[in-house]
Image (spheres, rainbow, N blue to C red):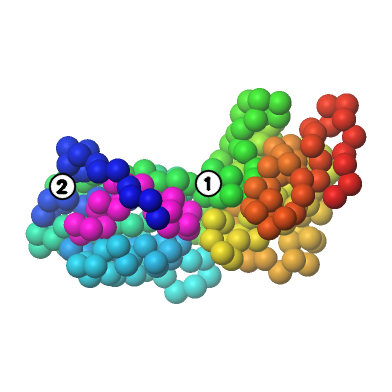
């Protein structure tokens, strides 16, 4: 490994006693951690971490107590209110607390709720953004969420609400009409309902879809299918959460931008996947 450049101390804030930093750990690959996150890990007295945090990252917090506070659908999980109050308790004990969350803490990560509770109890906070799986995870699959030839809009949607059910207050017709590309977090459990809602809203059954599980890790899997075949193909593939579902023509860009496939010698399948007058080449 080459020597990393020295970072002046004024760019590395101090995690003071009694503070809580809410920090995004990225989608899984430890190399996607930010410098601010690494700086926080090296200062923390206590790290409260989520289920989707790569535990290898915790090795960078050698002096910290690690407390697991993961929440996974369908499995015994910590109550969100208890997690938030635990952060308050530790801060009031004068601990330097790092709340480490997968992805970005403010993108379907309940970070806003925890920050609210801390502020209500007079606990000083700092927010450290992270790379969200809906962007970074798709990039590792070779799918750009925006592309000038494909889409000028992208919508991020959660696949379940606070109760664990498919969100009842989403206007799927408006979502379908208003965005060229949809990125759905935590959608596998309710994929059949989501698929049905989008088809009923007029999305074409042959619209490209990709499902990326365990994004950016050595367990990453990518399923390419269509909206009409999504549930059937997903069941056949035996894929399970955590997953990101991308719906839209940007999925076609994977045919030429699957950079991880290039590393293993898999050739690009179509040098013009958007179909602008150039025939697809055989794989």
Residue 224: assigned label: none
Q: Is residue 29 magenta?
A: yes
Q: Quadrant of the N terminus?
A: bottom left
- In the displayed structure, does residue 101 sit left or right of residue 281? left
In this view of the protein, which residue sits in the foreground, 135 or 279? Answer: 279
Residue 134: x and y in percent read 55, 46
Helix, strand or loop under label 1: helix
Residue 166: x and y in percent read 59, 54
Residue 241: x and y in percent read 59, 63
State the residue position of label 2.
Answer: 14
In this view of the protein, which residue sits in the foreground, 253 or 89? Answer: 253
Q: Which residues are magenta?
A: 25-44
State the residue position of label 1.
Answer: 136
x 81%, y 46%: residue:
269
Q: Residue furthest bottom?
A: 76
- In the displayed structure, does residue 190 sit left or right of residue 272? left
Vertical placement of 202 versus 39: above or below? Answer: above
x 54%, y 61%: residue:
217
Helix, strand or loop under label 2: loop
Q: Residue furthest front?
A: 2
Mark 2 closeness class: few <14, some 14–19, many ≥20 residues within 10 Å: some
Residue 171: x and y in percent read 62, 38
Secondary structure of the magenta portion, mostly?
helix
Pointer 2 or 1: first along the chain: 2
- In the displayed structure, does residue 150 sit left or right of residue 168? right
**Number of numbered tags placed on the structure image:** 2
In this view of the protein, which residue sits in the foreground, 232 or 65? Answer: 65
Viewer can see residue 98: no
Q: CA distance from mark 2 to mark 1?
A: 28 Å
Viewer can see residue 15: yes
């Amino acid at each position: 490994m080459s020597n990393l450049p020295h970072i002046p101390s004024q760019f590395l804030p101090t995690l003071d006693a009694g503070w809580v930093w809410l920090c995004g750990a990225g989608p899984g690959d430890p190399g996607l951690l930010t410098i601010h996150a690494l700086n926080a890990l090296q200062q923390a007295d206590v790290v409260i971490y989520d289920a989707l945090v790569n535990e290898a990252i915790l090795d960078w917090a050698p002096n910290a107590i690690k407390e697991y506070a993961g929440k996974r659908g369908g499995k015994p999980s910590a109550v969100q209110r208890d997690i938030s109050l635990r952060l308050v308790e530790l801060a009031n004990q004068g601990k330097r607390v790092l709340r480490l969350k997968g992805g970005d803490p403010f993108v379907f990560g309940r970070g806003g709720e925890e920050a609210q509770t801390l502020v209500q109890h007079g606990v000083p906070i700092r927010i450290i953004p992270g790379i969200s799986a809906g962007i970074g995870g798709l990039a590792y699959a070779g799918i750009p969420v925006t592309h000038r030839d494909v889409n000028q809009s992208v919508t991020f949607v959660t696949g379940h609400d606070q109760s664990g059910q498919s969100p009842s207050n989403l206007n799927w017709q408006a979502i379908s009409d208003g965005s060229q590309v949809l990125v759905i977090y935590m959608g596998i459990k309710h994929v059949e309902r989501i698929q049905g809602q989008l088809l009923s809203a007029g999305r074409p059954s042959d619209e490209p879809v990709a499902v990326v599980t365990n994004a950016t890790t050595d367990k990453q899997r990518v399923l390419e299918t269509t909206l009409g075949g999504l549930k059937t193909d997903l069941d056949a593939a035996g894929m399970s959460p955590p997953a990101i579902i991308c719906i839209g023509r940007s999925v076609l860009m994977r045919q030429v931008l699957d950079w991880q496939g290039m590393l293993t010698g898999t050739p690009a399948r179509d040098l013009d996947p958007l179909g602008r007058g150039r025939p697809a080449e055989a794989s």
